[in-house]
Amino acid sequence: MKKAILLLVSIIACYSCNTKTNESLPPNTYEITANAKGVVNGLRAYIHSIENNTQVVIDTAIVMNEQFVFQGKIANSSIKTISINSIQGSLPFVLESGKTTININKDSLYYSPVLGTKNNEDYNAYKAEYREKGSAIDGLNDDYRKATTQEERSKIIARAREITTMLDAFAMDFIAENSNSDFSLLLLETQIANPDINLEKLKNNYQALQPIINKNAAYKSIGSKIKSEIAIIEASASLNIGKIAPNFTAPSIDGEMITLNEVKGKATIIDFWAAWCGPCRRENPNIVKVYEKYKDKGLVIIGVSLDKPGQKDRWQKAIQDDKLDWYQVGSLQYFNDPVARMYNISSIPAAFILDEDGKIVAKRLRGDALEKQIASMLD
C-alpha cells in the first residue's frame, strides 16, 4: 500500500489579470518590470534560454525595493524562463519587444501573471487552463488515503494517470484550438524536443499554423525548424529492420555531395563513428578487414562522422591513420549531424546494414557478428 501511495504522489503535480497599454520603445527592444513583493532586496533575477540542451543566462537584474527591471534588444519573440535566487521554481514567459509587467508570486513563481503583450496574455490563458484541468487531481491523494478497498484505490490511481495523460497532451491540444495565436507557434517550437510527441498532432498543428508562420521571417525560421523535425521523426519511424533506410545527401570530407541511394551496393554499411570515439576506433580494424574481403563482391560503406565543430583535421587524420578507404561524410555538428539525427543516433559506434534494395537487414553489429552478416549476403 505504501508503494501505491508513493506512486500516486509521484504523478500528482501542482497545476490571474489586467493588461496595460505599451508605451513606445525602439524597435526590437524589451523592457520587463517585475513587481516582487516580499522578495528580499539584493537577490539576483535571471532570464534563461535553452541552447543546444544547455541553459544559458541571457540577462540579469537585481531586486531593489521589491522590484527589478530587465532591458535589452531582441531579434524575435521566443519562450524563455525567469528565475530568482532563493525563490523556488521558474517562470516561463514570452520574451518579445515592448513593455511587460510581471507581478511576481514568490510562492508559485510559475503562475506569476505576465502582462502587457498579446503573446504573454495568451500564455497566461494557457497556464490558467492547464491549472484548471490539473486541479481535478488535487483531492485524489486524500481520496486514496480514505479508500478502504483495493478496488477503490486502483480506480483512484487510474484516474490520476488519466489526468496526467491529458495534461501531457494539453499543449498540443491547446495549439490546435488556438491556431490563430502567434503564441501557439512559439509553444509548438518548444514541443518538438519531446521524444514522445504525437507525430500526427505535430503535422496537423504545423499545417494549421501556416498563416502565422508566413507573417514574418522569424516565424518562417521557426516553421522551417518544425518542418525539419517532422522529417526527422518520420524518418526515425522507418528505422526498423525490414524498412527501407531513409535516403540522405551529405557532404564528404572533400566537399562532394554523397547520396545514399546513388552509391549503395549489394550490401551497404552505414557506419556512424567519430575520431574522438575510442570504441569506434577500436572497431575500425574489423570494418577494414570486412571491407577488404567484400568490396569486390559489392560491399559499400558510408562512414558518417559525428566529429565536433572545428575538428576536421582530427577527423581527416583518423581516416588516414585507420585506413578507412570508403565514403566519409559529415557536417562537424557532433550528435546534431543531420544524418545522425535522421537515423536517431544517440551513441556510437552504430551501424546499419542494408541489402541491395536499401532495406535494413541488421543494426548495431560489431566484430564477428558484422562479418557473418555481410558473409551471409555476399558469399
Image: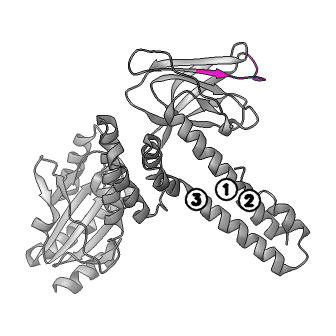
Q: Which quadrant: the N terminus?
A: bottom right
Q: Eyeballing the image, is 117 above or below 225?
A: above
Q: Which residue is mark 3?
A: 168
Q: Which residue is mark 2?
A: 136
Residue name at image x 77 percent, y 76 percent: 154
Give the quadrant of residue 146: bottom right
Task: State the image coordinates of residue 18 (x, y, percent, origin top left).
Answer: 64, 29
Q: Eyeballing the image, is 174 above or below 145?
A: above
Q: Do callouts 2 and 3 mark residues in contact (Cβ within 8 Å)? A: no
Residue name at image x 69 percent, y 20 percent: 43
**38 in the magenta segment:** yes
Q: CA distance from mark 3 to mark 1?
A: 11 Å
Q: Earlier in the sequence, mark 3 or mark 1?
A: 1
Q: Is residue 49 visible?
A: no
Q: CA distance from mark 2 to mark 1?
A: 6 Å
The magenta segment: 33-41
Disc 1, SS = helix
Q: Which residue is mark 1?
A: 133
Q: Nearer the viewer, residue 72 or 262?
A: 72
The residue type indicated by label 2 comes to Ala
